[in-house]
Image: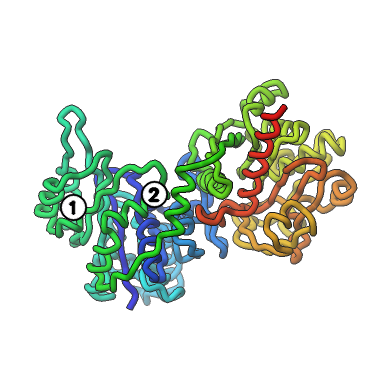
C-alpha cells in the first residue's frame, strides 16, 4: 500500500516547504524506497506558464511538457526522479476540470459544490502519482500558509484522504517558524502553537512538527511544544538555516526525520545510504579553485527567475571542485561597447539564459559580441542561443538589422522566426514544450561533452532558428552542432574559432543534478576556469 505524506506551512510563507519536501524525498529514497514528490498550489492560474517571472520565479518544465512551480526543480534535483504533468496541480486546473465536466452534463444536473465535488477532484489528483508510478511513498506539498482562504479546499481534501487510504498510510508534517528574540535571547513557540491549533481546528492533527529556526532548539522548548501540540518530543524536528540547501537532507537525517517518518507510517527503518550526497556536499564546501560567471539577463532583480540556471552553475562548480561566484547584470544596462567591456571584463565566463520579449535584447547582443571577440566562454540558453545567432548574423555575416521576429516583426533578416506550421496558431498553443530528440555533430563541443551522438532535452520556447538562412551560417564560422531530426530544427550552435561558445535552444538546467552536473554546465565551468588560468599567466 502506498504511503502518503502531506506537508503544510504555518505562521509565514517562504519557509522552505519545497526544500523540506525534497529533502525528505531523498532521505526516504536513500532507504531503498520509491518516492515521488508533488505540489498542489491554491492559486487560480491553470499553471505558472503565463505568470510574470518577477512574481512567481522560474517556470520548471518536465519531460512531458508540464509548466510547473519551481519547487518541482528541487524535487527532481534531490530525488533524481523525473516528474510529470500530474506532479503539479493548481486550484485553477481543479476548477477548470470540474466546470468542463459540469458543462458536459457530468453531474447529471446536480449542484456542484466545494464539498464534495472540489475536494473529490483534489483527492483524485493526489492519488494519481501513485497510480502512475507505483511509488512506495508520495510526498505532497500544499502551497500557501494555513489560514489562507484559498487553501481551505486543499486542507479539507488531505483531511478526508486519510480515511480513504487508511490512517496507518497517512502522515502530516507541519512546517512553521520559530522566531528568536535577540533582545530577550529567547525562542518563541507561541506562533507555532497557534498555527497547530488552527490546523487542528480544520480537522488535522500533525504527526511531525518541523521548525525553521536561526538558533538550535533546546530540549525544554521541544518538550513544551510536544505537550501543547499533542506530538511526541522526538517528532519536533528543528530545521536550522544551512549554508547550502544541499546540506539540509543531511541535517534532517541527523535530526531523526527519516526514523520518525518510518515509525509513523509503519515502514521498516532500513539502513540509509547518503554517501554520494555527503561526498558531493563536502566537495561543495571544500573547493580547490574559484571562478566568476557573469549572468546577463532581464529578470535579474529576482534571482529565483533563474533558479535552475544558478543551481546548475553550482553543480558545474562541484564537478570541477570550484567555487562559482555569479555576478548579476541587467542586460538593459549594457548600452554601448564601453559599458559592456567594463562590466564583463570581471568575468571568466558569460551565460545568457532564457526569456521572452524585446526588453534588454540589445544589451545581450553586446554581451555575446564581447564573448566572441574576446574569446571568453559563452553559454547561451534558449533566448541566449538566439542572441548568439543574431549577433553572428549582424557582425560576421553583415546582416545589419538581423533579428528575431519576436523582437522586430519587420526585420529584413529574420534569422529567428516562427516556423510555417506555427503561423496563425493561438499564442498559448505555439510553445514547444517538453523533451525532444537532438542529433549531435561528430567532434562538436556538445558531442564531446555528452559523449553521445543523440540526446533528449527539455524545451520551452516559440521561435526557432530560421532554416532559410542555414546555408549562410553553415558557410561561416558558426557550426550547427545539433539538429532535431523530426522537424529538422537547429538545436545547438557553436563558434568554430573560439575556446567555448555554445548556444542551445533547449533548457539543460532542468536536467542537472548536484551529484551529476549536466555535461554542458560541467564543461562551461571547466572552460571558464581554463580562461581564468590563461588570463592569470598573461
Q: Is residue 83 above or below residue 528?
A: below
Give the secondary structure at mark 1.
Answer: helix
Q: Which of disc 2 and disc 1 is earlier in sequence?
A: 1
Q: For this rendering, which residue is in front, 233 or 153?
A: 233
Question: Which mark is on residue 247?
Answer: 2
Q: Is residue 301 above or below residue 513?
A: above
State the image coordinates of residue 81 (x, y, percent, origin top left).
48, 64
Q: For this rendering, which residue is in front, 482 or 58?
A: 482
Number of numbered discs present? 2
Give the secondary structure at mark 2.
Answer: helix
The answer to whether residue 142 is visible is yes
State the image coordinates of residue 76 (x, y, percent, origin top left).
48, 59
Q: Which residue is mark 1?
A: 196
Residue 269 left/right relative to 37: left
Residue drawn at x 48%, y 56% as measured from the top left: 77
Residue 39 left/right relative to 496: left
The answer to whether residue 201 is visible is no
> Hey, which quadrant is residue 293 in on the image?
top right
Residue 446 left/right relative to 6: right
Pointer 1 and pointer 2: residues touching (CB < 8 Å)?
no
Q: Is residue 107 above or below residue 298?
A: below
Amino acid at each position: 500500500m502506498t504511503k502518503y505524506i502531506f506537508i503544510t506551512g504555518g505562521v509565514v510563507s517562504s519557509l522552505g516547504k519545497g526544500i523540506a519536501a525534497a529533502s525528505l524525498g531523498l532521505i526516504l529514497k536513500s532507504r531503498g524506497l520509491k518516492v515521488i514528490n508533488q505540489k498542489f498550489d491554491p492559486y487560480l492560474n491553470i499553471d505558472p506558464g503565463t505568470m510574470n517571472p518577477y512574481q512567481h520565479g522560474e517556470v520548471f518544465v518536465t519531460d512531458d511538457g508540464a509548466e510547473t512551480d519551481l519547487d518541482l526543480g528541487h524535487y527532481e534535483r534531490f530525488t533524481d526522479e523525473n516528474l510529470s504533468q500530474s506532479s503539479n496541480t493548481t486550484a485553477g486546473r481543479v476548477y477548470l476540470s470540474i466546470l468542463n465536466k459540469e458543462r458536459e452534463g457530468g453531474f447529471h444536473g446536480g449542484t456542484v459544490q466545494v464539498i464534495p465535488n472540489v475536494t473529490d477532484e483534489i483527492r483524485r489528483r493526489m492519488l494519481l502519482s501513485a497510480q502512475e508510478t507505483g511509488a512506495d511513498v508520495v510526498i505532497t506539498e500544499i502551497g500557501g500558509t494555513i489560514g489562507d482562504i484559498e487553501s481551505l479546499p486543499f486542507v479539507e481534501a488531505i483531511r478526508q484522504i486519510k480515511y480513504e487510504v487508511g490512517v496507518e498510510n497517512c502522515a502530516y508534517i507541519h512546517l512553521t517558524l520559530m522566531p528568536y528574540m535577540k533582545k530577550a535571547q529567547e525562542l518563541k513557540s507561541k506562533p507555532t502553537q497557534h498555527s497547530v491549533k488552527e490546523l487542528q481546528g480544520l480537522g488535522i492533527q500533525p504527526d511531525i512538527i518541523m521548525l525553521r529556526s536561526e538558533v538550535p532548539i533546546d530540549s525544554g522548548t521541544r518538550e513544551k511544544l510536544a505537550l501543547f501540540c499533542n506530538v511526541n518530543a522526538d517528532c519536533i524536528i528543528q530545521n536550522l538555516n544551512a549554508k547550502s540547501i544541499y546540506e539540509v537532507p543531511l541535517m534532517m537525517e541527523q535530526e531523526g526525520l527519516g526514523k520518525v517518518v518510518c515509525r509513523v507510517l509503519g515502514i521498516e527503518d532500513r539502513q540509509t545510504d547518503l554517501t554520494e550526497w555527503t561526498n558531493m556536499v563536502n566537495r561543495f564546501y571544500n573547493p580547490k579553485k574559484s571562478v566568476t560567471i557573469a549572468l546577463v539577463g532581464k529578470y535579474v532583480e529576482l534571482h529565483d527567475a533563474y533558479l535552475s540556471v544558478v543551481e546548475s552553475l553550482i553543480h558545474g562548480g562541484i564537478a570541477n571542485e570550484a567555487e562559482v561566484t555569479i555576478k548579476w547584470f541587467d542586460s538593459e544596462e549594457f548600452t554601448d561597447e564601453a559599458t559592456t567591456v567594463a562590466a564583463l571584463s570581471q568575468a571568466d565566463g558569460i551565460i545568457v539564459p532564457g526569456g521572452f520579449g524585446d526588453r534588454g535584447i540589445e544589451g545581450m547582443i553586446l554581451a555575446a559580441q564581447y564573448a566572441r571577440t574576446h574569446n571568453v566562454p559563452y553559454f547561451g540558453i534558449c533566448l541566449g542561443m538566439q542572441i548568439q545567432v543574431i549577433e553572428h548574423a549582424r557582425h560576421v555575416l553583415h546582416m545589419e538589422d538581423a533579428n528575431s521576429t519576436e523582437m522586430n516583426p519587420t526585420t529584413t533578416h529574420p534569422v529567428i522566426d516562427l516556423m510555417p506550421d506555427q503561423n496563425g496558431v493561438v499564442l498559448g498553443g505555439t510553445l514547444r514544450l517538453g523533451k525532444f530528440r537532438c542529433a549531435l555533430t561528430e567532434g562538436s563541443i556538445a558531442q564531446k561533452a555528452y559523449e553521445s551522438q543523440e540526446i533528449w532535452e527539455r524545451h520551452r520556447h516559440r521561435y526557432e532558428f530560421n532554416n532559410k538562412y542555414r546555408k549562410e551560417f553553415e558557410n561561416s564560422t558558426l557550426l550547427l552542432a545539433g539538429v532535431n531530426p523530426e522537424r529538422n530544427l537547429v538545436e545547438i550552435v557553436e563558434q568554430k574559432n573560439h575556446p567555448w561558445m555554445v548556444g542551445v535552444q533547449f533548457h539543460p538546467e532542468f536536467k542537472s543534478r548536484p551529484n551529476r552536473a549536466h555535461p554542458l554546465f560541467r564543461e562551461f565551468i571547466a572552460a571558464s576556469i581554463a580562461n581564468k588560468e590563461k588570463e592569470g599567466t598573461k
